[in-house]
Amino acid sequence: MRQSTRFLIVILLAIMFLGATLFVISTTGLGWRIERLLAEINYALNPPERMVFAPIGQTPAPQTAAPLHLPSSTPTISLTTPTPTSQPPATPLPTVPTSAPTPLPDQAMLSGVRHMFQMWNNCGPANLAMALSYWGWKGDQRQPAAFLKPNGRDKNVMPYEMEAYVEQQAGLDAAVRVGGDLNQLKAFIAAGYPVIAEKGFEGEGFDGWMGHYQVVTGYNDADGQFIVQDSYKGPDLPIAYDQFLSDWRAFNYTYLVVYPIERRQQVLEILGLQAYDNYNIRSATQKADADVAQLAGRDLFFALFNQGANLVAEQDYAHAAAAYDAAFANYAQLPEASRPWRMMWYQTGPYFAYYYTGRYQDVINLATQTLDAANEPILEESFYWRARAGLALADADAAAKDLKQCLVVHPGFDPCIQEMLKMGIEPPPTPVIRQ
């Protein structure tokens, strides 16, 4: 047998062995370990914490928010964070009662939430499934994941996406609010509603800070602790109030409450004035302003990001851009080990602020850095905003490429579909989601 023939046989056998190994890994649930190893190797070779975004645009300095005022419109439970395209219209709901709130008990604990450990890269669907289970929903995390993450490698699920699943697929309703506080969470728990909180997370097996969800199911004032269902660490996990607040700050104190439609009036009563979008956003802005005035280091970075997010929700894009400029300047001063370099996986406010102030190159630079820093560029929002900025700079070819890639990483992502249609490009068919 010739030497070259032997060599080819060895190569073919090696390929067959590798294929069989990968098949076994994928079918035995070990695939995520390979993915983690590859990510760690990539991050070791290209440390993402060393990348620092430096804005090139100029905007006015941020101003302190105006004093809170009583709203004149009817209350709404809708998104307080814009979707990738625009702020959705508010839906009028019943009037919020003006009676004094009921005093809260010193402790409360809910039972009935089925704890679920998350599958790889499946934090959002797992936590949503846990919250839904409290109301008798029989599914598991796989059903929300099929809707929320058509591509299982997607890095993030947004609160508005979770709200959409609840309302469109689960037959329940949901309220998403920002600027929450401990008493608001306690009020919901005491009334019989578990709460999903979006928070920062640092734990074993992960390289640095990342975003996370937890389902809050209890509290005890004597111990100064919440009880949470954690899809990564386990059930009935106690967390001190101070630690919970510190982690929660990273996501503008955002929370989501799932509830049966017939209980909407009670949810409105618990929210009080926070049921009004304009009041909720303005109070969150003032909360962020107070944090900015008194915090330093990484906590200040999060507070500035929150300030920008709330100003974006108020469509004050110039001052939002300035807040984000300050946040990125603060980020550059942080020790590399503590930099939350995954931040843009979860929050897209800077894209709104820079795009709507005409800072298109900043949008492109930030999106490019965000995609480059990920071990896999599976961030549909970054492709979407880079495409829009590219179009604004008359680079239609680059925009079309980004929009097509957006739909590769998130099939059926409507904002990218709509942009392609505007360009006269036929988008690929949207896959059918099977629950």
Image: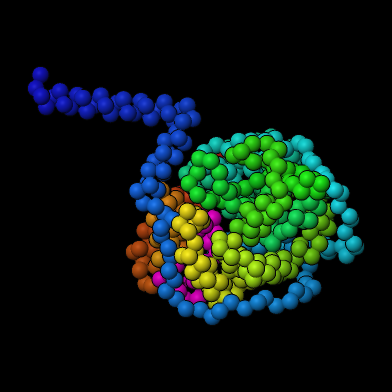
Reply yes or no: does residue 359 show up in magenta: yes
Q: Residue 73 location in percent, x, y?
A: 77, 71
Task: Name the residue rendered at 48%, 59% in the picture.
Answer: 335
Nearer to me, 291 or 152: 291
Nearer to me, 333 or 290: 333
Question: 385 above or below 345?
Answer: below
Task: Name the residue rendered at 54%, 55% in the picture.
Answer: 346
Nearer to me, 202 or 351: 202
Q: Tell how many labels.
A: 0
Question: In this view of the protein, can residue 56 be seen by the observer?
Answer: yes
Give the main secondary structure of the magenta stretch: helix
Q: Quadrant of the N terminus?
A: top left
Q: Residue 418 location in percent, x, y?
A: 49, 61
Task: Name the residue rendered at 65%, 46% in the picture.
Answer: 214
Question: 228 above or below 247?
Answer: above
Reply yes or no: does residue 397 show up in magenta: no
* Residue 396 appears left or right of 202: left
Quadrant hosting residue 10: top left
> Which residues fall within the magenta stretch?
343-364
Task: Name the residue rendered at 10%, 24% in the picture.
Answer: 3
Coloring applied to the structure:
rainbow
Q: Quadrant of the C terminus?
A: top right
* Residue 166 appears left or right of 302: right
Question: 174 above or below 73?
Answer: above
* Residue 174 appears left or right of 48: right
**Seen from this angle, which residue lies furthest top?**
1
Q: Residue 96 location in percent, x, y?
A: 83, 63
Question: In this view of the protein, can residue 163 be seen by the observer?
Answer: no
**Seen from this angle, which residue lies furthest bottom?**
60
Q: Residue 42 location in percent, x, y?
A: 37, 46
